[in-house]
Structure formats: structure tokens, C-alpha cells
Image (cartoon, helix red, strand yellow):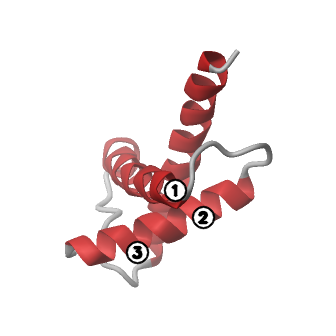
Amino acid sequence: MGIIAWILIGLFAGLIAKALTPGKDPGGCLVTIVIGIVGGLLGGWLGKVIFGVDSIDGFFSLSTWVAAVVGSVIVLLVYRLVTGQRSR
């Protein structure tokens, strides 16, 4: 997949992750994209390690989107923990 596809998946996966996890979200659109891209990479890696499958097949593959959203939720929760403790 190209860089534009990764940015689009990152944006949508980050937005879905923010919608699925309640609470105040730090950061704006750029942070959402970065969280989504990092989450997509994390989700793909976890899919390979845990299930032994190639979860990043293509832009329109369901496994790509599931891996990106699950990874984005994990990254978002970790990001909230890190930034929440720093602001106290």
C-alpha cells in the first residue's frame, strides 16, 4: 500500500478508535492520523505474532481495517495514560 493509503487508513482507524473509547481525547486531527497509522502497524504486527496471519493485505481488506482499529484503540489508551499523567 502507498503512503496515501496508510494516511487514509490511519485517519479513519484513529477516528473509529476515538469513537469506540469514551473519554476526553488529547490531540487533534494530526494526532488522530498518527495514532491510526501506528495502531495499524501495531495491529498488523500483533496479527502476525499472535495468529500467524498476514493481517495487512490491502486497503479494502477487512482484516486490514480490523487490525488497524484494534491497534489504534490500544495506542490511544496508552497515549491517554501517558498524556493524562503528564498534565496532573
Residue identifier under label 1: 32
Q: Is residue 23 positioned above or below 68 on the image?
A: above
The image position of residue 75, as x and y in percent, is 51, 41
Please report contact status of discs 1 and 2: CB closer than 8 Å, yes or no.
Answer: yes
Residue located 52% across and 56% down the image: 32
Please report contact status of discs 3 and 2: CB closer than 8 Å, yes or no.
Answer: no
Residue identifier under label 3: 8
Numbered tag placed on residue 15 in the rendering: 2
Residue located 29% across and 61% down the image: 54
Of the residues under marks 3 and 1, which one precedes in the sequence? 3
Q: Give how far apart the Cα atoms at labels 1 and 2 are.
A: 7 Å
Q: Which amino acid does label 2 sit on?
A: Leu
Of the residues under marks 3 and 2, which one precedes in the sequence? 3
Within 10 Å of disc 2 (Cα), the crowding (few <14, some 14-19, many 20+) is: some
Q: Which amino acid does label 1 sit on?
A: Thr
Residue occupying the far bottom of the picture: 60
Q: Locate residue 3 relative to residue 22 in the image: left or right.
A: left
